[in-house]
Amino acid sequence: MTRTSIRGKAAALTAAGLLALGAGVLTASPASASADDLGCPSGAACIYGGPNFSGGVTNQYWSRGTHRLYNQLGVHTVYNNQTDGWKFILCKNSNGTDCDWTFYQGAAWDVDLTPYNSVIVTP
């Protein structure tokens, strides 16, 4: 698969997410790209190296609990490709407190990760 193809699929996924948000639906699933095509396997929550799914997957989270987040500065795509309704939560403190961004199953957003120091994976 070429890089152009992945970018095209990422753009389609982002557009579908924006359309879903405009319609008031926050749990829309990707319309034209599978997560595996974008490098985030089913059952994982992923952080990409840059915005718009660029830079490849730099972090994958599979296990329940609080995890420290290191060296993630600036805008990155965060994608929750977990199953069974699990959530992925961004927290400002390193111990999983002061959390203000929850990604439900299938959600993907570009986020400035500079203020975040931990994440929580939870059912």
Image (cartoon, rainbow, N blue to C red):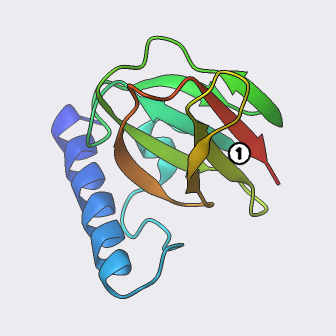
Query: Residue 63: in sight, yes or no?
Result: no
Q: Secondary structure at mark 1?
A: loop
Q: What x and y, as percent, mark residue 51? A: 26, 37
Q: Residue at (79%, 62%) from the top-left corner?
A: 84
Q: What x and y, as percent, mark residue 38? A: 41, 41
Position of 4 compared to 62: left or right? left
> Residue 76 versus residue 5: which sits nearer the camera?
76
Question: Residue farthest to the front?
Answer: 98
- The image quadrant that residue 12 belongs to is bottom left
> In the displayed structure, would residue 60 be above or below residue 41?
above
Q: Residue at (82%, 34%) from the top-left corner?
A: 65
Position of 83 compared to 2: left or right? right
Question: Residue farthest to the bottom?
Answer: 23
> Residue 9 versus residue 84: which sits nearer the camera?
84
Badge 1: residue crowd in 10 Å (few <14, some 14–19, many ≥20): some
Q: Residue at (60%, 36%) from the top-left corner?
A: 91
**Which residue has dot 1 on it?**
43
